[in-house]
Image (cartoon, rainbow, N blue to C red):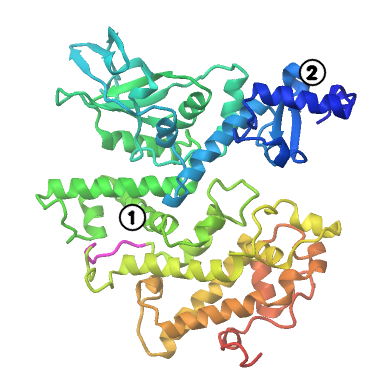
Amino acid sequence: MGSLYLSRLSNEDRQSLIKDLLSSQASNCFICGKVIDLAIHGNHIDIDHVEPTKVGGKDGPDNFAVTHDSCNRTKQASDLRVARILASFDRITESIKSEDRSPNLGDVLSEYGGAKHPLSTNVEGDTLKTGFSDIGQNDVLTVPIYEDKISKFRYSFLNLPIEYLHHDDHINPRAIGKNLKKILEEFHRKLPQLHIALGWLDTSHGKASKVYIFDGQHKTAAQILLGVRCLPVRVFINPDRDILLTANTHAGTTLRQVAFDKSVQRSLGSSLLADRMDRYRRECGRDEADESFSERDLANHFKGESREMKRYIIDWIRSSVTTHTDNKLRDYIDYGGRGTDMPLSYSTIDKTFYSFFVHSDLLTTPFNYKSEEGANPRRLEIEQIVRLMNIIAEKIYIGMFDHSLGTRRIESDIRKGKSIPEPHLRAFRMAKEEILYNWLRYLRQIVQNYFITTGKPIDENKLFQYPIPDACWENIENFVDALKKLPLWVNKDLSLSVFGGKRNNDYWQAIFESGRAPDGVDVMLAGIDTMEMIKPRGIGA
């Protein structure tokens, strides 16, 4: 805690201070808000500075709070007030865990009393009138309407109570990421919000309309978590949502104006595909549920964006795998790509699983081709990639990779003599991008060879669009079992050499082919023999 004041207290004075602080805190932990019972938690509580002394906080009773020791030692911010807010956000995260997703602005609004009402408006020429009668504010608010000279979209600036704010998870499907902490800390230091949120509403039907926030959700969420109840928003009036979706996607992809990670880009591409399919049906006079057209038909119809259409379709496949409710590997993927908690980055998944197993050309078969028989090529592709990921998750990660240890400085800790559990070390090493890239190539070869030896003609570029027989899945499982048992994954001496730094794909290709690294280090007794490794355990061992 680093407190001179506390270090000078006798045990009796310390206990008296704790009781006084608990009384002011209604006997609750300052961070998590749960009860502190001295009879039960007496040996597991901390006293800490609310405002850190290093930023000017006083070292005295007025700046102390009592917490559970576990809450204090796992706090996500040095300022206890920010740590308390982050703990409340963690509770929101936990409350939606059963939905297999991360929280977004809509969840924060719901928790803090927002997203309750549509906004009644009256548009007269270049003026918009509105009010907030639902929350007892009966004054009529009149604001000017402006026109964007390029897009011709009309918009107004409104300072809206959170009861009238709603999240648009179609245009912005992003979950709230780890940068929420940094934004919270910025706002907590009284630094101003530099960019206001963007929203839209539809007044064309003459009825009250919800105001949907589609940009700026992190800043909006941070302010709500800090207790702000009214927020400025630039509101587009009756916009073309498809254009907003496209502009928001380009901001995070080609323009790099927004910090979209790749998984969000895939999700946005998936949304854009759905929109283009709806437009295709309308423009071709088809039923709204019709799927008797192909990926190639879409690209031909939207000729001016055929390259984008291809990207939207492939993004749809990747997003469908990533967000699949049965995908057990996704709990081990860092979607931001910079963390140290997960063994796999989304970028690694993109360059390995999706690069090897997603067919990247457009299909000429209809979207509903063989859907009733369960043999639709794209659906097969998605389901079989998920099945492959699940095999790898069950055999290498679940119950073996320890999230509390993470991936930070693992090899360095080994060189310092620190004990790392072998299952965790194995999972960590097998997930390195250049290593995973090479052993997934062997899995691809196993599937290819199976079809060749059984005499089934296939297009190897569409490998996972063919039903993979159970016997081939057994070969895959046997290979992964044999691969994970190789001694190199838990050989701590190799931390000084082959695992000592970033290697390229060719480096590990040489090791897997010969057993020896290009720099002469002996890594395995021999190169990988897939025919031996796909044999059931006990045969050829």
Look at the image and tell me in which quarter the N terminus lies.
top right
Regarding mark 1 in the picture, which secondary structure is present there?
Answer: helix
Q: Is residue 156 above or below residue 151?
A: above
The kind of residue on which mark 2 rests is Gly
Q: Nearer the viewer, residue 119 or 29?
A: 29
- Name the residue carrying label 2: 60
The kind of residue on which mark 1 rests is Ile
Tell us which disc is closer to us: 1 or 2. 2
User: Residue drawn 13% across and 46% down?
Assistant: 283
- Name the residue carrying label 1: 313
Q: Nearer the viewer, residue 321 or 313?
A: 321
Can you tell which mark lies on residue 285? none
Say if the magenta span includes residue 160. no
User: Residue drawn 24% across and 11% down?
Assistant: 129
User: Residue drawn 42% across and 35% down?
Assistant: 251
10 Å crowding of disc 2: few (<14), some (14-19), many (20+): few
What range is drawn magenta here?
Answer: 361-367
